[in-house]
Image (cartoon, grey):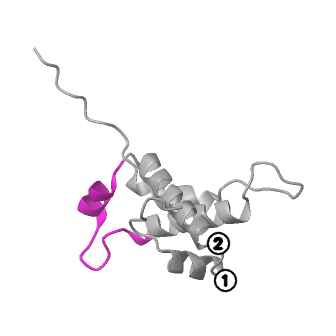
């Protein structure tokens, strides 16, 4: 099954981050990567173009902190595949919040009223 293409993550980079040496779950990693990027953009209140325009550089269009936060979400999803488990589960690490906070849109500009 084909999922939305990732904007800044790749399956190869996810595998390197999560120390995954096999290929049989690449489609699952694609799903987790797409979902992580969507989640980060939703939390930030920004789309890809907005992130690139406001925070990107020529060398790296997406800030490293946003990439790292996305990888944390992917790894958390991969390691904790269900909301219920006989093992102790953990919330997304606090580091995630610290990484993305500087990029969050705090308030939306009000739309002008039509007269």
Q: Which mark is residue 103?
A: none
Q: Are marks 1 and 2 in contact (CB under 8 Å)?
A: yes
Find residue 68 and report its horizontal and vertical position in percent: 51, 69
Magenta stretch contains residue 108: no
Left or right? Give the position of 86 relative to 9. right
- Residue occupied by mark 2: 25
* Label 2 neighbour load within 10 Å: few <14, some 14-19, many 20+: few
Residue at figure coordinates x 50%, y 51% from the top left: 39
Quarter occupied by the C terminus: top left
Give the residue furthest to the top: 115
Residue 6 found in image quarter:
bottom left
Can you give x and y, in whole percent of width and height, for residue 108 in the image? 31, 36
Q: Secondary structure at mark 1?
A: loop
Residue 24, x across and y down, in percent:
66, 76
Residue 82 or residue 73, whichever sits in front:
82
Q: Which residues are magenta?
A: 46-64
């Amino acid at each position: 099954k084909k999922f939305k293409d990732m904007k800044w993550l790749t399956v190869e980079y996810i595998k390197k981050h999560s120390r995954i040496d096999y290929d049989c779950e690449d489609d699952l990693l694609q799903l987790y990567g797409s979902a992580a990027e969507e989640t980060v953009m939703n939390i930030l209140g920004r789309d890809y173009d907005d992130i690139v325009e406001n925070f990107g550089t020529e060398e790296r269009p997406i800030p490293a902190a946003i990439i790292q936060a996305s990888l944390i979400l992917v790894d958390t999803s991969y390691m904790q595949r269900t909301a219920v488990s006989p093992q102790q589960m953990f919330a997304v690490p606090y580091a995630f919040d610290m990484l993305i906070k500087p990029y969050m849109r705090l308030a939306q500009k009000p739309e002008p009223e039509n007269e």
